[in-house]
Amino acid sequence: MHVAFVSMETAHSADRRGLERARRTARLLADRGHEVTYLCAQWWGGDAVPTFEHEGIEYRRVTREPAEGAFAARLPTALWRAGADAIHAVHGPPRHVAVAEKVGTMLRTPVLVDWFGDGASEPGSQARAASGGDLVTVPSELIRTRVREHGADDGSVRVVPESIDLETIREAPADDRFDVVYARRLDEHANVGTLLLALAERRRRDWSAAIVGDGPERAAVEQAARELRIDDRITFTGSLPERERVSIYKGAHVFAQTASVEQFATELLRALACGCLGVVEYQADSSAHELVEGVDRGRRVTSPEEMAEVITAAGNVPRREYNGAFERFGHEAVIETYVDCYEEIRSERGLF
């Protein structure tokens, strides 16, 4: 199958999780023998080079620089020249999604809109993007609800979660230095304070913790740990490669998820697959609680005191280094879900 991705920005030019999701999806499709064309603003060098082959994906220049108006104007021609079997529009500037949907109708090419939830939001502009495609894919029920609020029909929105590398999880050695782990970008939504207060409640007990990640709030988090007099038992690792993070999760007993905003809690998912007991503080703007609903090694809490109690009780839960219950989130399973979505919307249009 030939899939044309549409996104002015890419993970190579902008730091956004929705763009990284698109890059991963495109790469996994290419790895499985599908033809993938990525229509975007140029992010590679060479003014005279309109296309660039990378990771099995053909990136095609629509504009030389990211310019929303010019990109929207030139996108119809780029899509016509691509001649794809399906269009995968990455939610970002709503105008680009709307253009992709309109061109798809003209070309009789089905359009899937992948809506991660961290794209640009222009007042009053999201309804067209939410309702014009053949199918909208989202990472969680939280984002599904928001897309429906923008006017999408319930039956046209499908949850396709983030995927993880199960092979790395199986093969990575366990690093058992820490009992409790937190991992996320340390920004204004990190909300590490809940975990610090919970650990301070257990000051008289024996424990060690790791806070994995970096960001603008790291200094403030380290200062809070000092003020609570628990900094000598917490290691701030900074950002780590995936394999090193997985090793820490496999050796830890508890993974704490407290962020106030999370479209999909990927690090929590990795930790659960690594056998951790996942402790999630419920947050209205986070989907993390969805991953532990009905899961025997998942707990939900609403306060630092409850989190401290769960961490203490975790001592009675046997340690594990792999949890097969999360294999449905592996790369293979999730990319097949995307392929099923493409085939479904092609079939609905009478294309086989």
Image (cartoon, rainbow, N blue to C red):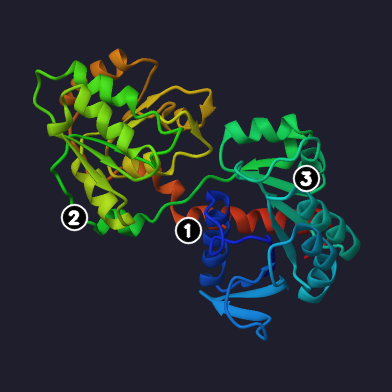
The answer to whether mark 2 and mark 3 are in CB contact below 8 A is no
Residue at label 2? 173
Identify the element where label 1 is drawn.
helix
Residue at label 1? 332
Query: Residue 341's spot in the image, x, y percent?
Result: 67, 53
Kind of residue at badge 2: Pro
**What distance separates the C-alpha of mark 3 from that of mark 1?**
28 Å
Visible in this render: residue 255?
Answer: no
Q: In this orientation, which residue lies closer to the viewer: 133 or 184?
A: 184
Kind of residue at badge 3: Ala
Q: Which residue is pictured at 74% across the width and 63% down the height?
A: 86
Identify the element where label 2 is drawn.
loop
Residue at label 3? 129
| 202 to the left or right of 333 | left
Query: Residue 286's spot in the image, x, y percent?
Result: 50, 30
> Which comes sooner in the sequence, label 1 or label 2?
2
Identify the element where label 3 is drawn.
helix
> Which comes sooner in the sequence, label 2 or label 3?
3
Quadrant location, the C terminus: bottom right
| 236 to the left or right of 116 | left
Quadrant location, the N terminus: bottom right
Query: Residue 271's spot in the image, x, y percent?
Result: 32, 42
Kind of residue at badge 1: Glu
> Which comes sooner in the sequence, label 3 or label 1?
3
Visible in this render: residue 221?
Answer: yes
Q: Quadrant of residue 9?
A: bottom right
